Amino acid sequence: MQFKFIALFIAFTQTIAFVFADVSSYWESFTSLVDPKNISIPAITQTTSYDVTTECTYYTPDASLITINSAEWPLIWKTATTNGMNTSAEFTSLYNSIDWTKAPSIQVRTRDINGNLDLTGYDAVNDPDCWWSASVCTTPKISDVNPDIVRCPEPETWGLTYDDGPNCSHNAFYDYLLQNNLKASMFYIGSNVIDWPYGAMRGVVDGHHIASHTWSHTQMTTLTNEEVLAELYYTQKAIKLATGLTPRYWRPPYGDVDDRVRWIASQLGLTAIIWNLDTNDWSAGTTVPVSTVQQSYEDYITMGTNGTFASSGNIVLTHEITNETMSLALDYLPKITSAYKQVIDVATCYNISYPYFENVEWTNVLNGTSSSSGPSTSSGSSYVKPNLALAILLAAAVLLN
């Protein structure tokens, strides 16, 4: 009988390895060897060079800081349910901890023959689903989901944000930000974090606000509930692994979000940060001339001095995706800082004291400090609590005897 109990115990403990009292505690299961308050980035050539080829040479992270087992992660740049992640005990436990009966009944979106979102038949005027791609809606039509953050409330403020990092060739760009004491909200892609973990660590060391930008950078409304959850969850896990921090904020790629996606994100305690000015810098030299993007920068800089933002600020969409986008940033940041009273990250401009789930206070807040309540999360769960699980095991032992 003793052997039966041992076998039962082993099987059951494997099952409850990822059991949470409720979904809001999911981040507590993440592991990291990195202390976000005391990060020492290895001084390898990739982290110090300005030569793009050298910077973007793959490296194996120091095992004392980061160990990456590819079997525990989705395939890089593929939908986050790949590599069997959707059937893993870890993800299944998370998925089943959510009360999906409360999820909005909104259909998964499709793409047309050109790969663009298909808006055919959708009522964009009444916009019942608060679908940003159809109407630029940012205030959910459902309860218990936070509105998207769209602008900095502080007047004459440029909300500095960069998407798609960490870019392997960002050393010169990050050095410039550091030398000029500029802090940005950096929206990191999970696949990039796994590929370039020291780059993510650099973001924390330099004092930037780190947030999520999904695992594979796809239009989120075209994904199933399971895929949306996986895209967000594994990005959270990757950022935690590399930085020791789990973000409370995220940005949907292309701004593509509706109330179904917002609701799923809220189950992980995530609130969306969008923008109210878009430089379209990613398109410079590819789909539009560089001069078109330069003119956008010039127009937005002028807004800093002509009274456009006299009562509130902006949040500007820019990228660290290529050397072109980072070069544009270097060209225009001096003009931006001259035209605006403040050029700051979103956590600072929104007076968010705790932008991460960990008890790490953001000290660059305006108007004093105020603990962020964080997004609404599901309070119910179908999960068995660990203490209850232990009681069940003990009861089973008695019965087996």
Image (cartoon, rainbow, N blue to C red):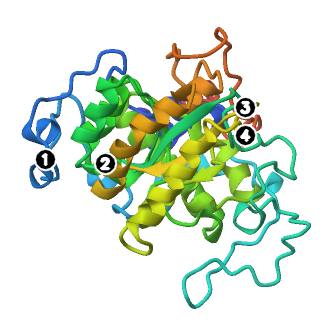
Crowd around label 4: few <14 · some 14–19 · many ≥20 (10 Å): some
Task: Tell me: 148 left or right of 158.
Answer: right
Instruction: Tell me the kind of residue under disc 3.
Output: Ala
Q: Report helix, strand or loop for mark 3.
A: loop
Front: mark 3 or 4? 3
Estimate the spatial distance between the alpha carbons at disc 1 and disc 2, rounded to whole Å.
11 Å
Q: Which residue is mark 1?
A: 59
Instruction: Tell me the kind of residue under disc 1.
Output: Tyr
Residue sticking out furthest to the right: 126
The disc, 4 or 2, on the residue closer to the chain's N-terminal end is 2
Q: Report helix, strand or loop for mark 4.
A: loop
The disc, 1 or 2, on the residue closer to the chain's N-terminal end is 1
Q: What quarter of the picture does the N terminus occupy?
A: top left
Q: Depth check: 69 or 190 in front? A: 190
Q: Which residue is mark 4?
A: 381
Image disc number at residue 310: 3
Estimate the spatial distance between the alpha carbons at disc 3 and disc 4, rounded to whole Å.
46 Å
Task: Tell me: 13 left or right of 395.
Answer: left
Image disc number at residue 194: 2
The disc, 2 or 3, on the residue closer to the chain's N-terminal end is 2
Q: Report helix, strand or loop for mark 1.
A: loop
| Quadrant of the rendered image containing residue 341 | top right
